[in-house]
Amino acid sequence: MDYKSSGVDIEAGYKSVELMKQFVKGTMRPEVMGGLGGFSGAFSMDAIKEMEHPVLLSGTDGVGTKIKLAFLLDRHDTIGIDAVAMCVNDVACAGGEPLFFLDYIACGKNYPEKIAAIVKGVAEGCKQSGCALIGGETAEHPGLMPEDEYDVAGFSVGVADEKDIITGQEIKEGDVLIGMASTGVHSNGFSLVRKIFDMTEESLNTYYDELGETLGEALLRPTRIYVKAMKSIKDAGVRVRGCSHITGGGFYENVPRMLPCDMHAVIEKGSYEVPAIFKLMQAKGNVDERMMYNTYNMGLGMVLAVRPEDKDKTMEAIKAAGDTPYVVGHIEKGQKGVTLC
């Protein structure tokens, strides 16, 4: 009797680490100390020594049941981007710069090539956000998870000077709301997605004219990472007064989170084009419109509040970072909450 006969293959774990090293290497920052494989990841504090009052910010998340689509399509190189995006976008939403990321992969059986593909996506997400992948864990769970399934989660640590943290408390009446385009459904609401569509390989490989691609391609597209856009806005000299990452709970839950108790957000639904995937989901699933906006990002992955005089500068900074901005509404006095009209 040995460990391998119980379902845990240590040698496969070693191979996974070797295969992923090439991807991890591309995420390194000067502050990273040591290499992959240690008991902990080391990161020098040199990155924050110029700050007056440095504050560490953190975010942790997974990708939810979107991972089921990766199983069905046997495509595993993008789901890691989602895991990173969900964490670093939260850090950026608070005005922070993500510094490093660690991942956790639980699997029924360690298939080294599959694990390496997952980590390739994690590394790509880290490169997009400028943070280093300094460690992680791959755990085999025989008997707990099916052999061909896995789950991915992670967390990011970032930093901001205290004076630069975005709290929402500076939001004033008349401020402009700017939304940044999403890449689609991102990583929220997939339990409903899986009720709307048949979750089969055939269904996911069905081409839809209105999408211009297969259903699987539209749904599996990775979550957009907004770190560079937020940095571009800051570098342009704009003080973002409030920021909301539109994740689970959609607009009705997330927009109020950035508001002071006496401010109300008004968002005009016609101010931008809702992506075709959401229109298809609403029609095919007969989903009430309010429920759509209460579950999904509906095409806006992040919403910012800025002073009216900073509107144009903010729009240009977002475009310079490669993202697409829309003026979507404004702030007025009233009970904390959001109206979509």
Image (spheres, rainbow, N blue to C red):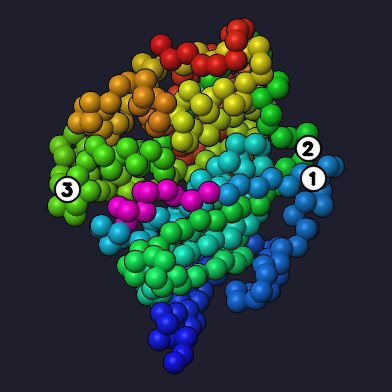
Quarter holding the N terminus? bottom left
Among the 4 quarters of the image, the one containing residue 41: bottom right
Residue 298, above or below 155: above
Q: Is residue 45 visible?
A: yes
Q: Front-most of 30 and 39?
A: 39
Q: Is residue 11 visible?
A: no
Residue 162, label in figure:
2
Residue 321 x/y as whole percent: 51, 40
Q: Amino acid at mark 1?
A: Pro
Assess disc 3: are there few (<14), some (14-19) or many (≥20) residues with their C-alpha within 10 Å of its C-alpha: few
Residue 54, label in figure:
1
Assess disc 1: are there few (<14), some (14-19) or many (≥20) residues with their C-alpha within 10 Å of its C-alpha: some
Residue drawn at x 65%, y 76% is 38
Q: Could you say whether the residue bearing mark 3 is in a helix, strand or loop?
A: helix
Alpha carbon distance from label 3 to label 2: 49 Å
Q: Could you say whether the residue bearing mark 2 is in a helix, strand or loop?
A: helix
Residue 252 x/y as whole percent: 48, 23
Residue 266, above or below 164: above
In contact (CB < 8 Å): disc 2 and disc 1: yes
Alpha carbon distance from label 2 to label 1: 6 Å
Among the 4 quarters of the image, the one containing residue 193: top left
Label 1 vs 3, first from the N-terminus: 1
Assess disc 2: are there few (<14), some (14-19) or many (≥20) residues with their C-alpha within 10 Å of its C-alpha: some
* First to last magenta residue range: 61-70
Q: Residue furthest right?
A: 52
Label 3 vs 2, first from the N-terminus: 2
**Residue hosting label 3:** 203
Quarter holding the C terminus? top left
Label 2 vs 1, first from the N-terminus: 1
Q: Could you say whether the residue bearing mark 1 is in a helix, strand or loop?
A: strand
Residue drawn at x 53%, y 49% is 61
Q: Residue furthest bottom?
A: 1
